[in-house]
Amino acid sequence: MSDTRTAARLRLLMSGCALLLAACGGGGPDAGSPGAPPPPSPPGNAARTAAATATAQSTSNACNAIRPFYWEIGDRSAALASGAVGGSAYGPGTVMNIASSSKWLYGAYVVQRRAGVLTAEDIQHLTFRSGYTRFAICLQGQTVDGCLNYLNNGVLVPASVGRFDYGGGHMQKHASLIGLGGMNNAALAAELRSQLGTDIALAFSQPQPAGGIVSTPVDYARFLRKLLDGSLILGSRLGSRAVCTNPLTCPTADGTPVPTTESWHYSLGHWVEDDPRVGDGTFSSAGAFGFYPWIDAARTHYGIVAREAAGGSGEASANCGRLIRKAWVTAVAN
């Protein structure tokens, strides 16, 4: 057979195959042809900001109950949206006691100081399973060890070793064990900044690593951006070494501030909001006066709900923060 006839037959065969594929739907848009419709674009920041702002300002959701407050959402580079709700009492530069939001800072400090290589003892104390569960309070003029020796703060409860029990005693004892015992408020603040960065302004109202820090939303946001951009090692370890925390669902948990209707985990100085029913995997560290910082499970955005109210719970701020976060992700107000 000549080359000319062979080529003609091949062209005819290929033409027939193409017609058959077209008739059966092969090669159409669903198969990735140039005619396939593009995937929908994610919401833009303008739509996200509008939804988050409307949610924060709503008078018919959980955010109404915590007014006044300041909120902010950003990424690893900068703040992207923010606002003051219920007046001008709080803003990015407002100095406030952040209570248990201090725990995330101390956890990051320890991980940075250890260059990411934690000891078993570090992990036990940072996940609140050390057995030092009788912590009450520190006084302003004390040192770390002075506080540890005050009341029953430094008493080990053997039956609690290995069991999760949320409280400040674990970090107080840990700070003493790693050589911070002689430090007062000023020295302790300088020590944390030596690892977290001197660009993060913070002070201590009492020498308590787990709850004594005074700072501002803008400085805490700077810390969260360092976690996101990798400047702080803990950013790559968020959620690691996490333990269960709800006494009703966890056989090794004794005490948690989270409502027992939800089961979260606790990692190195921070929560993992991964309840199987309503959790979204967010990392957070709410404080008793209402300061609520978070980083989303994808580690792309951070957020803060900031206020300082006597009896203003972290749970209430977290409930509002969840709604703002969801509005940002979906660009739909809640």
Image (tube, helix red, strand yellow):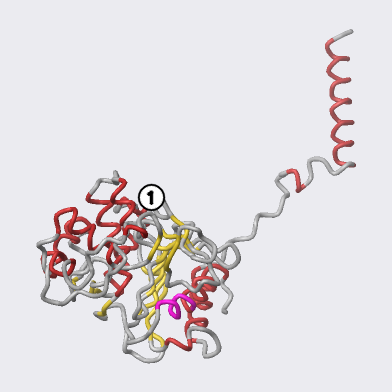
Residue 317 magenta-drawn?
A: yes
Q: Is residue 119 above or below residue 281?
A: above
Q: Can residue 322 be seen?
A: yes
Q: Quadrant of residue 92?
A: bottom left
Asked whether, in this view, residue 189 is left or right of residue 44, the answer is left
| Residue 176 x/y as whole percent | 17, 58
Magenta stretch, main secondary structure class: helix
Name the residue at the front extreme: 159
Q: Is residue 59 above or below residue 236?
A: below
Say which residue appears at 54% left-offset and 85% top-offset: 61
Disc 1 crowd rating (10 Å Cα; few below 14, some 14-19, many 20+) is: some
Q: Can residue 126 be seen?
A: no
Quadrant of the snapshot with the C terminus: bottom right
Asked whether, in this view, residue 309 is left or right of residue 153, the answer is right
Residue picked out by circle 1 = 236
Front position in the image: 139 or 161: 161
- SS of the residue under disc 1: helix
The type of residue carrying mark 1 is Ser
Name the residue at the top extreme: 1
Asked whether, in this view, residue 161 is left or right of residue 280, the answer is left
- State how many labels appear: 1
Q: Quadrant of residue 210?
A: bottom left
Say which residue appears at 18% left-offset and 53% top-offset: 178
| Residue 308 x/y as whole percent | 32, 83
| Residue 216 x/y as whole percent | 27, 75
Q: Which residues are magenta?
A: 314-319
